[in-house]
Amino acid sequence: MAKDADEMKIIASLKANNLLKTTVFLRGNKSLIDDSDININQVIVYRNEWSRADRLAVMKQLGTRDYQKILVTSPSNFRRLIGTDLSFINSAEYYTLGKATQKVIKDVLGSNAYCAKGSKRLEDAIYKIYDDSL
């Protein structure tokens, strides 16, 4: 899988500062760090999975409101959300922290999601949600 621009910047910085041998990436089993052409120490520290009970709990919690703005942090989280069949899914505005999640939302819903920018993406996304709410 091709590296995205942010991942390439991080890897270039680690290479430039000779830190690849002393750096370890703690990640989930679905993250996209591609180390096929470099040697990055990686440890999978969690599994990104939902049980049936998790899905039912989400439906119970979210099903009581009509959400208009949703921050989605990963493609797998969006796929899980649309699998819940909640009524607000198609009408909500979506905000993402990365282009991969933005692309999945566009592919599935046909609508464009806001993709946060800069080095403080979570902060940018939250400010954008706030600004769009005014």
Image (tube, helix red, strand yellow):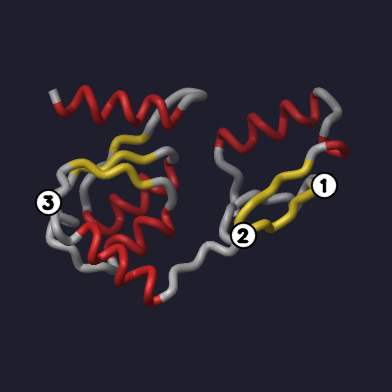
Residue 36 at x, y percent in the picture: 75, 53
Instruction: Please tell me which residue is depicted at 64% across the width and 35% down the height of the picture.
Output: 8
Residue 54 at x, y percent in the picture: 38, 69
Instruction: Please tell me which residue is depicted at 18% across the width and 63% down the height of the picture.
Output: 86
Q: Can you tell which of label 2 and label 1 is closer to the viewer?
A: 2
Instruction: Please tell me which residue is depicted at 57% across the width and 33% down the height of the picture.
Output: 6
Q: Amino acid at mark 3?
A: Asp
Q: Earlier in the sequence, mark 2 or mark 1?
A: 1
Most extreme residue toward the bottom is 52
Residue 9 at x, y percent in the picture: 64, 29
- In this view, the residue in front, 113 or 37, is 113
Horizontal side of 103 relative to 16 (left or right) equals left
Mark-to-mark CA distance, 3 and 2: 31 Å
Q: Earlier in the sequence, mark 3 or mark 1?
A: 1
Mark 3 in CB contact with mark 2 (< 8 angstroms)? no
Residue highlighted by disc 1: 39
Residue highlighted by disc 3: 66
Residue 46 at x, y percent in the picture: 62, 59
Mark-to-mark CA distance, 3 and 1: 46 Å
Horizontal side of 112 relative to 116 (left or right) equals left
Residue highlighted by disc 2: 46
On residue 26, the disc is: none
Q: From what the image shows, is residue 63 above or below residue 134?
A: below
